[in-house]
Image: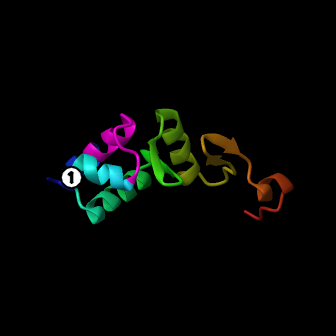
Amino acid sequence: MKSEEFDWTVYHAIAWNRATTIPALREYTGGDEATVEASVERLVSYLLIERHGEEYRALSIEESILKCHLRAGPGIHLEVEDGVIKIPDFARKGDNNS
């Protein structure tokens, strides 16, 4: 199976709440630990899922778009943590030199 196909299997397992931890994803997909972890890392980097402790969850389209803008957009001083948009302390205090 191609890595892209495996990534979609992992993504759908998470999005459909079939499996949300690495051990559960291994069992659900039949993949080995290294393959599942590599897939999860790719999905996180693609801004499709995020980690909360030991569990992963699918990002909503809005969360994914906002995170993409925050990653790529210079001068935007916001963070998203557990679905909450926050202003970092340095930006709130005006300590940013950029």
Query: Residue placed at 65% from the left, 40% from the top?
Result: 84
Indicate left or right for 71 with 12 as reference: right
Query: Residue placed at 37% from the left, 55% from the top?
Result: 22
* 17 is within the stretch colored magenta: yes
Residue 52: image x %, image y %? Answer: 53, 50
The colour style of the image is rainbow
Indicate left or right for 30 with 90 as reference: left
Q: Secondary structure at mark 1?
A: loop
Residue 62: image x %, image y %? Answer: 52, 34
Residue 9: image x %, image y %? Answer: 25, 44
- In which image quadrant can residue 13 be found? top left
Q: Amino acid at mark 1?
A: Gly
Query: Residue placed at 62% from the left, 46% from the top?
Result: 80
Q: Quadrant of the C terminus?
A: bottom right
Tell me how many marks there are: 1
Q: Residue furthest left?
A: 1
| Magenta highlight range | 9-21
Indicate left or right for 1 with 94 as reference: left
Residue 20: image x %, image y %? Answer: 40, 46
Query: Residue placed at 27% from the left, 44% from the top?
Result: 8
Q: Which residue is mark 1?
A: 30
Indicate left or right for 25 with 52 as reference: left
Q: Nearer the viewer, residue 11 or 87?
A: 11
Q: Residue furthest right?
A: 93
Q: Nearer the viewer, residue 38 or 20?
A: 20
